[in-house]
Image: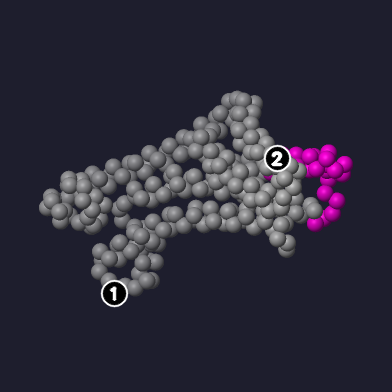
Amino acid sequence: MECPFCAETIKDEAVVCKHCNRDLRVALPIIAEIQETVLELDRLQRQLDRVNTSLALFDRPARFLFLNGGIYVLLPSLLLLAAHYLVTVAMNVSPLYLRIASVIIPMPFGMAAFALSKIGYRGAFGLGALTAAVSVTGMFAVVAYLDGTSMVPATLQEWRETFEYGLSIALAFLTGNILVILVLYILPSTIASSGKPNAAAYRMARMLGQHVGQETMRRRARRIQDLMQTVGPLLGVVATAAGSIYTGLKGVFGH
């Protein structure tokens, strides 16, 4: 942490600043209380954002659905359809470029869904699924119109490839949403947090070796607790991104 008097970095356990020699015993409880208050306000703000989103849906459902549907479903669907037309019709190049575009395009809309409208990961996956359904249906319609074929996949393999392609779009949307939650809320809260690590973090710290001092053990437990708070969402980003890329490119490179 930083000394409240000289702003130099000191250990969390310090009671006297080694730089300015100020007594920290009075200031530390106040600092800890302020940090806990900030974290609690952040948690309450997130709850308020979710409540406001729910109230907007129930208060004016038509306006809410029209606005969010237009921004987070119709707009990315139009961009995906444009990418499909350019890759498969106008330039007639490898479908690999379309699959890459179908992973990249939905991600910023998933990020905006939370950053602007406070839509969480459940709603983001639903919006991503709707985007996938609208865009894939539109792609089939374009191909059917140009080639004079049926819009409906003819074989079980085509149905599976269609589902996997749509899933890659939905997962890309979800990846962007989780990523912005991690960056805007979880990482800042973890960085700002302080105080005594929880019991689980202490147990894991002791498993790594007990022949260290109490101060070293506490710092180790603090690092473990910070890691525990961030690893879940980070793994979620990695998993959804990997799933989106895998399902999106699977049909191009084969099974």
Along the polypeptide, which appears first: circle 2 or circle 1?
2
Of residues 186 and 253, the one nearer the viewer is: 253
Q: Is residue 102 left or right of residue 26?
A: right
- What's the residue at 35%, 69% (across, down)? 206
- What's the residue at 31%, 45% (across, down)? 35
**Residue 156: quadrant of the picture:** bottom right
Residue 81 is marked as 2
Which color scheme did the rendering employ for the protein? one colour
Residue 230 position in % (x across, y down): 44, 54
Residue 85 is marked as none
Q: Amino acid at mark 1?
A: His
Q: Is residue 177 left or right of residue 18?
A: right
Residue 211 position in % (x across, y down): 29, 74
Residue 95 position in % (x across, y down): 71, 52
Of residues 38 and 230, the one nearer the viewer is: 230
Viewer can see residue 44: yes
Viewer can see residue 121: no
- What's the residue at 30%, 66% (across, down)? 217
Mark 1 is surrounded, within 10 Å at the Cα level, by few (under 14), some (14 to 19) or many (20 or more) other residues, namely: few
Q: Is residue 96 above or below residue 42?
A: below
**Residue 77: quadrant of the picture:** top right
Residue at image mark 1: 211
Magenta stretch: helix, strand or loop mostly: helix
Of residues 28 and 250, the one nearer the viewer is: 250
Q: Which residues are magenta?
A: 132-157
User: Which quarter shows the C terminus?
Assistant: bottom right
Q: Secondary structure at mark 1?
A: loop
